[in-house]
Image: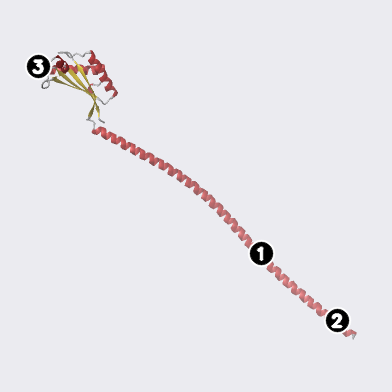
Amino acid sequence: MKHLTAALILCGGIALLASACATKEYVRTQVGTSETKLTQRVDGQEVRLKETSDRTAANAQAIDAGQKQLQGLEGKVGEVGTVAADAKKQAQSASEAVRDTDAKLEALNSRVANRNKFAMVETKTVYFDFNKADLRDEGINELEDVAKALKSDINAVVELQGFADARGTDRYNYQLTRERVDAVTRYLVMRGGIDIRRIHSVGMGKVVLAAGEKANNDSYAKARRVDIRLLSPQS
């Protein structure tokens, strides 16, 4: 009986030991499987983390390259703005030059159109003694003023018209008035320094008294003269 009991106990212990071993092996297998899965998961996470890190680095490089391109574009935009500003200034300068040229052309056209049109600037009269063509002192003073006016306006010209009183023949008076305008011309050229081409003169002969005007010494004195007309181009 005792031997049977011992045998049963031994068999139960063996069975229990076998069961324990089997359980231990199962646990080991399960643990190994879990460790493998955990390792694989960790490895997968590491791979994904590396991929994410690589993408982040690539994105950072792309952003840095984009910023550099943007800076380059900003620099080019600034250059374009500078070129545009310079072009605008040049266009304004060209426009001003065109307006100035137009104004000059208009002024030139006006001068050409009015080149033969003169406006009266001043008139003076030089008187002479009876039957004389010599300049008197007061006449010289008048001619000095005429010479100064001609020098101050290089485009001005002067007209001289000589007259005589009603006494004497027409032929004689034409000659006398010619001598009187010649005397004025010589003074302006030789003493005043005026170019003779700017002086236009003519002897008009004797002055015919107006209707109702009486001939006397005063009217005769006023007739013995050279009228001086200072003219300047209208342009």
Do labels 3 and 1 touch, CB within 8 Å?
no
Q: Is residue 110 above or below residue 122?
A: below
The span from disc 2 to disc 3 (Cα, nearest Å) is 193 Å
Q: Position of residue 9 (x, y in %)?
A: 85, 81
Sequence-first tag of 3 and 1: 1
Sequence-first tag of 1 and 2: 2
Disc assigned to residue 9: 2
Do labels 2 and 3 touch, CB within 8 Å?
no
Q: Is residue 75 above or below residue 60?
A: above
Q: Which residue is mark 3?
A: 169
Q: Nearer the viewer, mark 2 or mark 3?
A: 3
The span from disc 1 to disc 2 (Cα, nearest Å) is 49 Å
Q: Quadrant of the N terminus?
A: bottom right
Sequence-first tag of 2 and 3: 2
The span from disc 3 to disc 1 (Cα, nearest Å) is 144 Å
Identify which residue is drawn at 58% across, 54% down. Answer: 60
Image check: 203 left or right of 6?
Answer: left
The answer to whether residue 113 is visible is yes
Q: Amino acid at mark 1?
A: Asp
Q: Secondary structure at mark 3?
A: loop
Identify which residue is drawn at 28% across, 20% down. Answer: 148
Q: Which residue is mark 1?
A: 43
Disc assigned to residue 99: none
Q: Position of residue 200 (x, y in %)?
A: 20, 23
